[in-house]
C-alpha cells in the first residue's frame, strides 16, 4: 500500500514549547491544504490524528476523513506545555541517552509511539487499500518511516519534516 504521510500545518503555539499531545489549533490550514491537493488524490481514503491541528487539515483535504488516536503525536507527559529550555537538563539527558525506551514523566516512550503507529498503519493496510493519505505528526511520521525502512531509532528519531510536508512510503516497506 502506498501511504502519503502528511505533517500538520504550523501549530498555534509559541516556538520552543514541548506540545506533544496538547490539542492546539493549526495556522494557515487552507494554504497548506491547497498546496497538498496537488500531491495527493482525494479519492484515496484519508486517516488522521484526532488532534485539531491534524483534524482541520484532514477535513480540508477529504470529505470523510477517519480519525484514529494511534496517529497522535508522542505523549510527553509532564513536559507538555513547558519550554524545552525549562525542562530539567538531567531529564532531557536521560531521554537522549535512551531515545527509544525512556519515558518522560507521565508520558510514553518512542517505542510505544512506534508500536501504536505501526499497528494503525498495519490495520489500514489490512483493509486492502492500494493507497491512503495519513495526516499526522512528525513523531508518528518518523516512527512509520523508521519501521518501513528498517532504520535504527538513532536514525529515524532524527528525521525532519516541514509543517505541511508530504512523504510517500510503501507499507509495510522493505525491511
Image (spheres, rainbow, N blue to C red):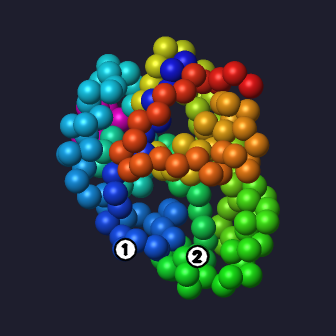
Which image quadrant for residue 43? top left
As displayed, is residue 151 above or below residue 38? below
Instruction: Look at the numbered disc 2 and give the secondary structure of its residue.
Output: helix
For the point 26% across and 44% down, the residue is 32
Measured Cα–Cα span from mark 1 to mark 2:
15 Å
Residue beneath disc 1 = 14
Residues at circles 1 and 2 in contact by the CB criterion of under 8 Å: no
Q: Quadrant of the C terminus?
A: top right
Segment tinted magenta in the rendering = 59-65
Examine the rendering and report whether any part of residue 127 can be seen. Answer: no
Q: Is residue 32 magenta?
A: no
- Give me the disc on residue 89: none
Q: Is residue 149 left or right of residue 38?
A: right
What percent of the width, then of the height, locates residue 89?
Answer: 68, 82
What percent of the width, then of the height, locates residue 82?
Answer: 51, 80
As displayed, is residue 81 above or below residue 136? below
Amino acid at each position: 500500500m502506498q501511504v502519503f504521510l502528511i505533517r500538520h500545518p504550523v501549530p498555534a503555539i509559541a516556538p520552543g514549547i514541548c506540545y506533544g499531545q496538547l490539542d492546539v489549533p493549526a495556522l494557515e490550514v487552507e494554504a497548506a491544504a491547497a498546496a497538498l491537493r496537488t500531491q495527493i488524490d482525494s479519492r484515496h481514503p484519508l486517516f488522521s490524528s484526532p488532534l485539531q491541528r491534524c483534524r482541520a487539515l484532514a477535513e480540508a483535504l477529504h470529505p470523510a476523513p477517519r480519525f484514529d488516536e494511534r496517529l497522535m503525536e508522542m505523549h510527553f507527559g509532564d513536559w507538555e506545555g513547558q519550554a524545552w529550555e525549562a525542562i530539567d537538563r538531567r531529564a532531557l539527558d536521560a531521554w537522549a541517552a535512551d531515545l527509544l525506551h525512556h519515558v518522560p514523566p507521565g508520558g510514553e516512550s518512542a517505542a510505544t509511539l512506534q508500536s501504536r503507529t505501526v499497528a494503525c498503519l498495519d490495520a489500514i493496510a489490512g483493509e486492502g487499500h492500494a493507497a491512503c493519505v495519513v495526516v499526522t505528526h512528525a513523531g508518528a511520521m518518523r516512527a512509520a518511516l523508521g519501521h518501513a525502512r528498517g532504520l535504527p531509532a538513532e536514525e529515524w528519531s532524527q528525521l525532519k519534516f516541514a509543517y505541511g510536508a508530504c512523504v510517500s512510503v510503501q507499507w509495510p516497506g522493505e525491511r
